[in-house]
Amino acid sequence: MSMRRWLTLGALPTLLLCGCPEKKAPREDPNVVATVNGEIISRSDFEHELTREIQSPDGESTPSPDQMALYKRTVLDTLVERALLLQAAKVSNITVSPEQVDRGVLRISSDYPAEGFDEALAEGQLSRAELKQKTASLLTVEKLFDQEVYPRVAPTEDEIRRYFEQHKEEFQELEEVHAQQIVVKDLDEAKHVQQQLRNGKKFADLARKYSLSADAKLGGDLGFFKRGVMPPEFDEVAFKLSVGQVSEIITTAYGFHLFKLLEKRPARKVELPEVKVEVERRLMLEKRAEAQHAYVKTLKDKADVHVNEQVLLAVTGKPSGRAARVAEP
């Protein structure tokens, strides 16, 4: 469960869900949407999170009744899971330090210019204090998984071999070419460069002098590339050239090009020892996700969760006064 997955600012309205205060409440309390082992999910907090979930960038789209019902269940399920995981962490005495929380917030904010980060928080109706609280919850859950779930997960040699056999095509090395290019703005200039090449001038020197492409300072060196990486016109020419051969003038949307092929790497089959680390990494991610899902299911199966359906039905998802104020620092 990565930091980016839970706390990407584009998903703040959906994923940064509120912590639930540890207090008892009557099951039919009209201010309570649900209880999780006696811990409440309040109507106000639930409405706030639902508003984040359903808000659109333009603020105009309105969910249909069916969509609203789905949004409500999605938010409720996420809040219930969050509460169960934090309860499990508390039982295991798992906590995070203020310094770890500060570093977590810094990692999130570092992806944005200062003003852009504040704008994203405001759009998500989230204050910096709330962000710290939710980051602390996230880090606590991550630590819970690291200590209680992931140590039991490790792919076996047989599983690694079987995965490789089932995904062999994904690990094969495709044909690659290493080419240079010169691109100019008009045909006459391209012909002038072409004539200089025929007179023995070096391709790299002419690229530095005439080419408009960003790779001109590298002598027009495009490096190695597989089919489909460059524009189709590049592939059509480069993969047909012989090593050392210069192409005819090629016209693209970027201008008039000349290409020179420097090297070719043929396609080849890759054996397991060469990619074992990557295979093991992929398998580990899969197995961790499965173990995480199973762990949460176990918590749910043992939990006493009560949903106040009447309150849930009455929730509209419209911004409340609290939601309007929460973005203030």
Image (tube, rainbow, N blue to C red):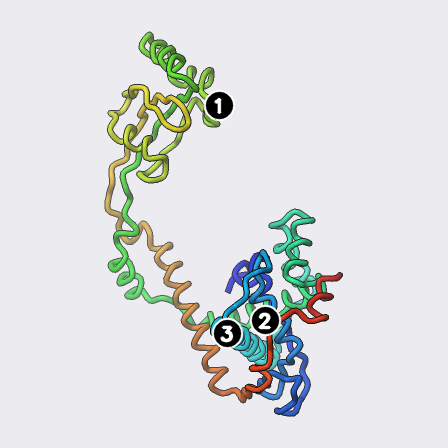
Please state the horizontal and vertical placement of residue 196, each as a whole percent of the image. 36, 9
In the rendered image, which residue does mark 2 sit on?
A: 50
The residue tagged with tag 2: helix, strand or loop? helix
> Is 329 located above or below residue 185 in the figure?
below
Which amino acid lies under the numbered mark 2 shown in the image of this protein? Leu
Graded by Cα atoms within 10 Å as few (under 14), some (14 to 19) or many (20 or more), the crowding at tag 3 reads: few
Can residue 140 be seen in this snapshot? no
Please state the horizontal and vertical placement of residue 21, each as a whole percent of the image. 68, 79
The residue lying toward the viewer, choosing from 100 and 25, is 25
The residue at the point 50 percent across, 74 percent down is 65
Which amino acid lies under the numbered mark 3 shown in the image of this protein? Pro
Mark identifier at residue 217: 1
Mark identifier at residue 65: 3
The residue lying toward the viewer, choosing from 185 and 248, is 185
Q: Disc 3 or disc 1, which is closer to the eye?
A: 3
Sequence-first disc among 1 and 2: 2
Disc 1 to disc 2, how far (Cα)? 53 Å
The residue tagged with tag 3: helix, strand or loop? helix
Which amino acid lies under the numbered mark 1 shown in the image of this protein? Lys
